[in-house]
Image: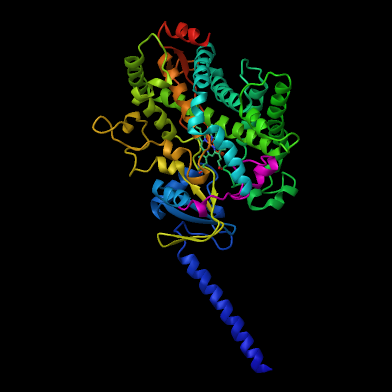
Amino acid sequence: MSGILYYLVAFVGALVALAVWRQRRRASILPPGPPADPLIGHLLRMPSTDSALVFHEWSKTYGPVMHLKVLGRSMIILDSYQAAVELLENRGVIYSDRPKFTLYELLGWNPSLVFLQYGKQFNIHRQMHQSYLSRHKAEDFKPMQTQEARTLVQNLLDSTPDKYEKSISRFATGIITQIVAGHRITSNDDPYLHMSKMVYEAMSKTGPPGNSPLDFFPLLQHFPPWFPGAGHVSVVRTSKSTVRRLHEFPLRMVKEQRKAGESMPSFISDQLEQMEEGADDDDLKGAAATMFGAGEVTTWSTLSIFVLAMVLHPECQAQVQKEIDSVVGGARLPEFGDREDLPLVEGVLQETLRWNPGAPLGIPHRTIKDDIYRGMLIPKGALVFSNIRGMSLDENMYSNPTSFDPERYLPKPAGKGEPKFSNVSFGFGRRICTGQYVANNSLWIAIASILATCKITNAVDENGKIIVPESTLTDGIVSHPKDVRCVISPRSPSAKPLIMETVG
Ligand code: HEM
């Protein structure tokens, strides 16, 4: 008996030793990262603000692929374009899942392509989005985007500085509502504008995606908001109805218009055509709300970043306007057909995306199995963040990266031949932004139209002192400039009549 016990104890001991050895070996080949505390890992070291910038600073010590562990969950931060392409694109089979986003699910973003885990439903939603927003299909939206860009300029020139942000948001919302629901916004009282404001307010309270205490401890949803770590419960309570409305309202409107024979071409209408009578429409509601939620705030924030860049860089503004004048002259406004001939406008777009990326940490992917990259273990289930902000500051790719320099993209010797940032700003691999072509075109035509007709200058305070806005951005799934105080006025006496002619 004692012999059997002896062998049993020895066997269990060997198993424990093997498990410890395996764990130590695994830990020893994880990517480097800052020192961690026992049990809680990097919890206390996690930045509460500007996470992307802090991670980038850490990467200078630990390298472009870092490992962090928070409460048992592995996080991999990719700080270089090369690592992001090699993993998220070239090994897409392993790296295309998403973690569970408890906070967003509780808010009612379900089903949503952005948060869906890799699998059958993801494929269905991805196909729904891609088929309507492909590079080819995006061509169809160009006349509408041009029209909205002209209206944007008119609204900017007609409004007081405190309303600029509203006009830009109206532009972004106006494009997405036409794509999603065939609805053209013609007044500032439009219900979609109200919804977009509410959605933005809700999303700006959530912090970077997948990082709230609720995501780590879903049980916290059952605790009152005052309980430590359960603060987001109150965001869920106040914002759930907004998200629900965004799911219900567009489909209801399109269905009513179709009944009345008044519906315009749109994503929802297109999908309804393909659906069988009485089929479940939850997927359609989710896909439409996601296009709206993912497409509006990002475009609005990026254009606000452009305005901020122009206030801070008047010399660059003047130089690009010279280019536009030389191609377009003063008798018409820039069209998409001019794009090839306006490399500096392209440079301003690329530099706006790079100088302060609107989605600085992207949206985390998740690995579906262990992987080895350059001798390092990327564990199964790890959250993989592309540090888009970090990549924008990579000195191996961009010289003097904190400066705003649209010429850097011009081919050598006129420029520096640096790579376009649109390859980075929309994410990577099988989860790359499905709205990238639409977004790229919206931004280009808005930037070209504004620069052709408007002068963006510093505002002055009540004492006549010039206001220089700080280039600080909010934290959250999307970053937005905190201060874009400026004055937007017509560049020339002919600017306003020219816009009036095109807007009609
Ligand atoms: C300046 C504008 C935009 C920026 C900077 C941006 C950026 C991003 C980024 C970084 C991601 C994450 C990609 C990844 O996981 O690797 C993403 C995903 C996504 N974007 Fe955009 N986006 C923009 C505009 C749009 C627009 C206009 C739409 C729709 C009309 C859209 C729809 C989506 C969707 C549905 C996803 C999730 C894709 C998936 O998980 O499979 N985005 N975007």
State the residue at coordinates (62%, 36%): 290
x 65%, y 42%: residue: 104
Q: 160 and 354: which one is in front?
A: 354
Residue 447 position (above or below residue 42): above
User: Is 104 one of the magenta-colored residues?
Assistant: yes
- What's the magenta region? 91-119
Residue 260 image position (x, y, % from top left): 73, 19
Left/right placement of residue 59 relative to residue 249 reads left
Q: Residue at x 25, y 33 (%)?
A: 412
Determine the main secondary structure of the stretch shown in magenta.
loop
User: Horizontal placement of 426 versus 60: left or right?
Assistant: right
Placement of the N terminus among the 4 image quadrants: bottom right
Q: On the image, which quarter does residue 178 sit in?
A: top right
Residue 395 in the image, given as x and y percentages of width and height: 34, 43
* In this picture, residue 462 sits left or right of residue 493: right
Q: Nearer the viewer, residue 297 or 230?
A: 297
Residue 469 in sight in this render: no
Residue 26 at x, y percent in the picture: 49, 67
Residue furthest toward the left?
A: 413
The mark tally for this picture is 0
Task: Answer above or below: position of 429 versus 7.
Answer: above
Residue 91 visible to an observer of this rendering: yes
Query: In the rendered view, does 397 fall on the left or right side of 49?
Result: left
Residue at image x 36%, y 33%? 403
The answer to whether residue 206 is above or below residue 147 is below
Residue 267 lies in what quarter of the image? top right
